[in-house]
Image (tube, helix red, strand yellow):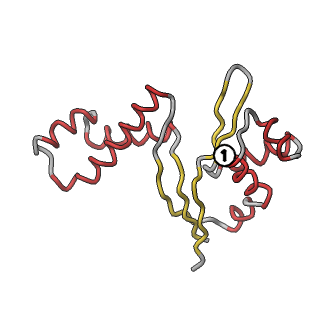
């Protein structure tokens, strides 16, 4: 089944994409931008320029302020096995991460009246699908955060 996902990139994903552009063009973004603005780089690269610029600005904002805001839209082909991973409880977890303010995995489990171990297992599966990220807060707390803003199932 085809699945359309609108999600936030993680800082690591943004950095990987920036490094891919640096490797592709053999220079830093600042060097590329300078050449591009002086019209020394082919205008057909305008898409790459704007994508790279967005990534760099989002990452710099993350480094300075601690928050990353970079959304992408993906179309993924989900196998029947992957579709089975999206159980009602896991979908409820995604919704809860958006609607509830949670301080930790155990806090989330408590608010959902579920076993912490089961919630953690479900969150790990959602993380593998790229829907959730774990952020460390303080010394001990691991806070789950959703990366997904929208999931649409396309039946064709």
Q: Is residue 146 left or right of residue 121?
A: left
Q: Which residue is mark 1?
A: 127
- Residue 77 position, x and y percent, is 57, 66
Instruction: Find residue 49 and report its horizontal and vertical position in percent.
Output: 26, 47
Which residue appears at 57% of the width and 54% of the height? 149
Q: Quadrant of the N terminus?
A: bottom right
Displayed quadrant of residue 5: bottom right
Query: Is 152 on the left or on the right of 123, as rendered?
Result: left
Q: Residue at x 69, y 61 (%)?
A: 82
**Where in the figure is residue 56, as x and y percent of width and height?**
36, 37
Residue at the extreme bottom of the image, as rendered: 156
> In the visual, does 48 lie left or right of 15?
left
Camera-nearest residue between 132 and 111: 111
For the C terminus, give its image quadrant: bottom right
Residue shown at 89% from the left, 43% from the top: 115
Helix, strand or loop at disc 1? helix
User: Callout 1 environment at 10 Å: few (<14), some (14 to 19), or many (20+)?
Assistant: some
Q: Is residue 136 above or below residue 91?
A: above
Q: Nearer the viewer, residue 83 or 23?
A: 83
**How many numbered discs sit on the rendered protein?**
1
């Amino acid at each position: 089944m085809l699945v359309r996902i609108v999600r936030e990139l993680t800082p690591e994903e943004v950095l990987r994409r920036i490094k891919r552009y640096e490797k592709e063009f053999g220079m830093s973004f600042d060097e590329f931008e300078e050449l591009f603005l002086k019209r020394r780089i082919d205008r057909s690269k305008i898409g790459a320029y704007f994508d790279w610029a967005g990534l760099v600005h989002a990452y710099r904002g993350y480094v300075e302020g601690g928050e990353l805001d970079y959304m992408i839209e993906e179309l993924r082909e989900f196998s029947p096995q992957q579709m089975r991973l999206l159980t009602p409880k896991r979908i409820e977890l995604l919704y809860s991460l958006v609607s509830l303010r949670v301080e930790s995995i155990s806090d989330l489990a408590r608010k959902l009246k579920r076993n912490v171990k089961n919630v953690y297992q479900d969150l790990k599966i959602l993380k593998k699908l790229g829907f959730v990220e774990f952020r460390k807060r303080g010394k001990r707390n691991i806070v789950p955060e959703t990366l997904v803003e929208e999931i649409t199932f396309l039946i064709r």
